[in-house]
Amino acid sequence: MILEIDGLVKQYKGITAVDSISFSIREGICFGLLGQNGAGKTTTVEMLEDIITPTSGTILFKGRERDRAFREKIGIQFQHTELLAFLTVDETLKTFSRFYKKPLPLAKIKQLCMLDTIGKQMNNKISGGQKQRLLLGLALLNDPDLLFLDEPSTGLDPQARQHMWQIIKDVKEQGKTVVLTTHYMEEAQTLCDEIIILDQGKIIAQGSPTELIDQYCREGQEPQNLETVFLNLTGRNLRE
């Protein structure tokens, strides 16, 4: 297991954002965290990323407690990141690559993230989909073992979303582990090998997309997808 989480809790002034959750993530898969806004997805991921400290519980990386080298082995694409408007795409990649001892070749990053044709464009002139692909490229510069993606396709048009999905599939095929938060059920069903569904800080379901659909969609109920799974579990639509 690349990550093992046991009894994870996060409280803020008496409010329990994450309520004693336990799960593990196998190496080389895309692992999804699903839930409505406020369900605890982002708080959970920020604890896994070592950005915020849990109130209690343990997180092991490759069987050991995380040390100072942990952050050198992970990549993070945040949901909201502002890029310097006065830099080009190429200049941004070169600047961020200097943060790492052994960055991947920029040509490889540009090819993987479909950035070859926009290298000379200024950051404030690229589209939303191009910006998301650039942010993903920045997260991959250090050749991480573990990649965190926080709602990477939010706000993208259907074509840009398809491009992002293909890149994520390509990244996984390279043997990297991807942890994905999303509220797009189609995205989770397309990309994820395993999923946990969070509601009010608790895990209410866990398994592969197929397993969850088989377990929680009633016979003859349509559509047979993760949207229906969430509706049956909570009585709510995911985006309410």
Image (cartoon, rainbow, N blue to C red):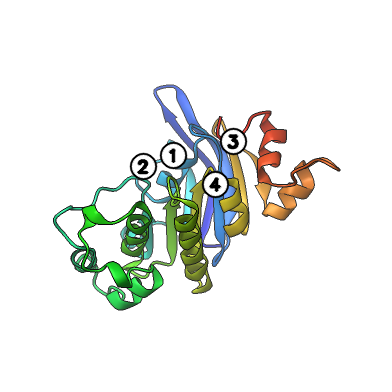
Q: Amino acid at mark 1?
A: Thr
Q: Nearer the viewer, mark 2 or mark 3?
A: 3
Mark closer to the chain start, 1 or 2: 1
Q: Which residue is mark 4?
A: 33
Report x, y in % for residue 140. 36, 66
Whether pointer 1 and pointer 2 mark residues with C-beta atoms closer than 8 Å, the reply is: yes
**Residue 164 vertical placement versus 79 (above, below):** below
Q: Name which of mark 4 and mark 2 comes first in the sequence.
A: 4
Task: Find numbered disc 3 in the image and state the secondary structure of the residue it sits on.
Answer: loop
Residue lying at the far top in this picture: please name it.
14
Q: In the image, which is nearer the foreground, mark 1 or mark 4?
A: 4
| Residue wearing tag 2 | 52
Q: Of tags 1 and 2, which is closer to the observer? A: 1
Q: Secondary structure at mark 1?
A: helix
In front of the other: label 3 or label 4? 3
Mark toward the start of the polypeptide (3 vs 1):
1
Mark earlier in primary sequence (3, 4): 4
Determine whether label 2 and label 3 are within 8 Å by CB.
Answer: no
* Sequence-wise first label, 1 or 4: 4
CA separation in Å, label 1 and label 4 = 11 Å
Q: Tell me: residue 16, above or below residue 67.
A: above
Give the residue type that dot 4 points to. Leu
Q: Which residue is mark 3?
A: 238
Say which mark, if any, is on residue 43: 1
User: Which quadrant would the N terminus be assigned to in this image?
Assistant: bottom right
Mark 3–mark 4 Cα distance, whole angstroms, equals 13 Å
